[in-house]
Image (cartoon, rainbow, N blue to C red):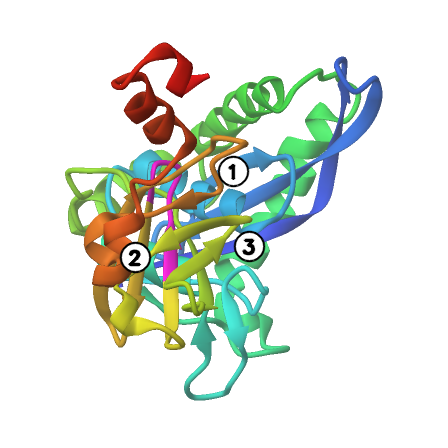
Amino acid sequence: KAGEEMEVDWCGSTLPYYDVQKEKELEAYIFVAALPASSYPFVYACDNMQKANWIDAHIKAYEYYGGVPKITIPDNTKTAVQKTDLFDPVLNKTYYEMARHYHTTIISARPYKPKDKATVENTVRNVSQRILAALRNRQFFSIDDINEALQEELSKLVERPFKKIPGNRRTAFEEIDKPYLQPLPEKRYEYAEWKEAKVQFNYHVEYDKYFYSVSYTHTNKMASVRATRKTIEVYIDGERVASHLRSYEKYKRYVTLPEHMPDNHRIVSGWSSERFLEWAESIGPYTKQ
């Protein structure tokens, strides 16, 4: 059905590029998406196939199409599915959150059933033969260079006329899929990592070797930590119990809010060398010395 599905996959072929800073040749991995109703393709190069790039490539695809399909169909890669199951696979939490933000449903293809996403499999073949093959003799020095070249070749592919019917992939997309896509949300999804952690005896949870406070009443409970580039949020039993600005200070590993402390800790929380020196100086320079 028009505007209903988007199938996604990684292309088996890669493109090499020379990183001047690292002084070595690296591989660019090619993300491919396709809308089955019109067979309208999208390609995007990434420096690895990890979760952050997987999510970013989806966002780029939705923005390229100018809308969001009702269903997104990946295969069972670890960046999409944590636990495979024929009827109820467990999705990666970040991937699920991104899908919820864009109001699309993730339905992963069944293991060893490529026909579940036959359109993108065919698109991967077209991308390999008509786009990557055309670029195989070019020298690239960055992922941005590759993406620029990919967009040029992609434009040629979607403008190429069909052999047996009038029009091309672009006109088919404009007529078939585009009118039925859901609108993009007002704000772009902000990438977030999730981690399960136990609230320690000192009422802090650890993320990336930094420690963030929650109310002391939650000591020894299991929590879910949601981390973006700027914020840290802590959830317990589905409820957000703490929010902090993310710390990057090398010598300040603990981020603690006074309201999270028990009374006896709060009383002495202000005790520090600076406080005692300031107190002594109020009496006199010799006392401070």
Report which residue position mark 2 lands on.
265
Nearest-to-viewer mark from 2 and 3: 2
Please, what is the three-letter code of the amino acid marked with disc 1? Answer: Val
Residue at far bottom of view: 87
Label whose residue precedes the other's in the sequence (2 or 3): 3
Give the Cα distance between marks 1 and 3.
10 Å
User: Residue, x 79% and y 20% (percent of image)?
Assistant: 22
Please, what is the three-letter code of the amino acid marked with disc 3? Answer: Asp
Dot 1, crowdedness within 10 Å: few (<14), some or many (≥20)? many
| Residue 160 locus on image (x, y percent) | 48, 30
In the displayed structure, 75 sits above or below 257; it is below
Report which residue position mark 1 lands on.
43
In the displayed structure, 101 sits above or below 105; it is above
| Residue 198 locus on image (x, y percent) | 45, 71
Lateral position of residue 187 relative to residue 41, left or right: left
Label whose residue precedes the other's in the sequence (2 or 1): 1
Mark 3 residue element: strand
Which label sits on residue 9? 3
Nearest-to-viewer mark from 2 and 1: 2
Magenta part of the chain: 225-231
Mark 1 residue element: strand
| Residue 23 locus on image (x, y percent) | 83, 17
Dot 2, crowdedness within 10 Å: few (<14), some or many (≥20)? few
Residue at far right of view: 24
Q: Is residue 208 within the magenta segment?
A: no
